[in-house]
Amino acid sequence: MNVDLLKRLCETPGVPGREERVRALIEKEVKGLFDSVETDAMGSLICRRKPRGKDNKANTAADAKVVMLLCHMDEIGFYVSHVDDDGFLWVNNAGGFDTRNLFSRRVLVCTDGGDIHAVMNPGGKPVHIASQDDRKKVPEISEFFIDTGMHKDEVKKKIQVGDYIVMDEPFREMGDKLVSKALDNRVACWLGIESIRQLDKAGKGHECEIVVAFTVQEEVGLRGAKTSSFAVRPDIGLGLDVTLACDTPGVPKQEAVTVQGKGFALHIKDGSFISDRELTKQVQALAEKKKIKFQRSILAAGGQDGAAAQQAASGAKAVGITVGTRYIHTVTEMCDKGDLGAARDVLAAYLEVAN
């Protein structure tokens, strides 16, 4: 398993609207895998691979179905919204945060002149002098500020409104797990690359045209997926993403969504889409035939890029291929290596037979 690629993807900063560094990394990784690679007006990277025979040479088939894999590049983060007279930075969020997870965080302020290490905290009294009521309060995002440790004059020279901020935490392997910020959704970027590599190495060819779209701004409303899906107009859309794995203390089993170690998640429904029944059955049958571990999942709320493909132009059949992840939208997002490998394997297997 190419863990190094996932590490590099996760540790590369890229919030909604500022995915260019992630895109550059992916462009280098996909060289030789696709017949064309282009960046659309919004910044999504659209990679096309024509049908191939068993000799692995590209051919053109006018009636070939278009299968689109949607993998969003952005991670949740912040934009600098104000630099105050004392040199502290105030922020506007890009994506959904639970502020209980934002206390005392190391962050990276990304500017045109380079990245600046800093810390994030909410305004208010430290525990030593806080009242009981103060200690119970959960602050709003608007109450958090960034301290760079620099003199206020230096801050104003180096940082401006519109610079972006990501969490500053390392990628770690922990037993059978992988832990990092931004697994949501660099996991999908990894799958979009590694499944095609696996398909390419098999050398058996594929009858469908494959389009892998590394999309932008999913965390703020599937924006890049909507425009890229409209341009591609796929017959089949595969939404690649993480999903909840609440198989941890404090969550009832019926709300777990997925359980880690039980394989990839065949994503049936969320707040943005309902999967195509026949396509879902086809992927499930293929996983069973290939003995690839899987589980079926429904997410009560939220959404993913597969919904955009499903609803683009005259519509497409769609299903989600997801990886159950603990502690989503924190700096300790955790996925299981076996589940990740299962998602890669079923994608490569499906693309080989899709027609």
Image: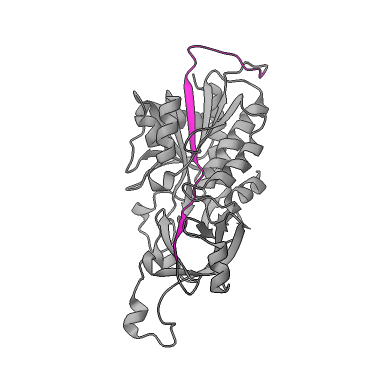
Residue 194 at least partly seen: yes
Q: Is residue 155 above or below residue 39?
A: below
Considering the image in quadrants, where does the N terminus appear? top right
Q: Is-magenta flag for residue 82? A: yes
x then y, percent, for residue 28: 66, 38
- Pick whichever, 280 or 8, lies toward us: 8
Q: State which quadrant residue 174 falls in.
A: bottom right
Q: Please, which residue is most extreme toward the top here? A: 62
Residue 215, percent from left and from top:
48, 39
Determine the residue positioned at 41% across, 57% down: 93
Residue 156 is situated, as x and y percent measured from the top left of the image, at 53, 66
Q: Residue at (56%, 13%) from the top-left corner?
A: 60
Residue at (37% x, 80% y) in the render: 135
The picture quadrant where one finds residue 201 is top right
Magenta residues span 56-83
- Residue 236 locus on image (x, y percent): 43, 26
Q: Is residue 260 above or below residue 287?
A: below
User: Is 100 situated above or below 348?
Assistant: below
Tally of numbered tags: 0
Asked whether residue 280 is in view, the answer is: no
Outermost residue on the bottom side: it is: 129
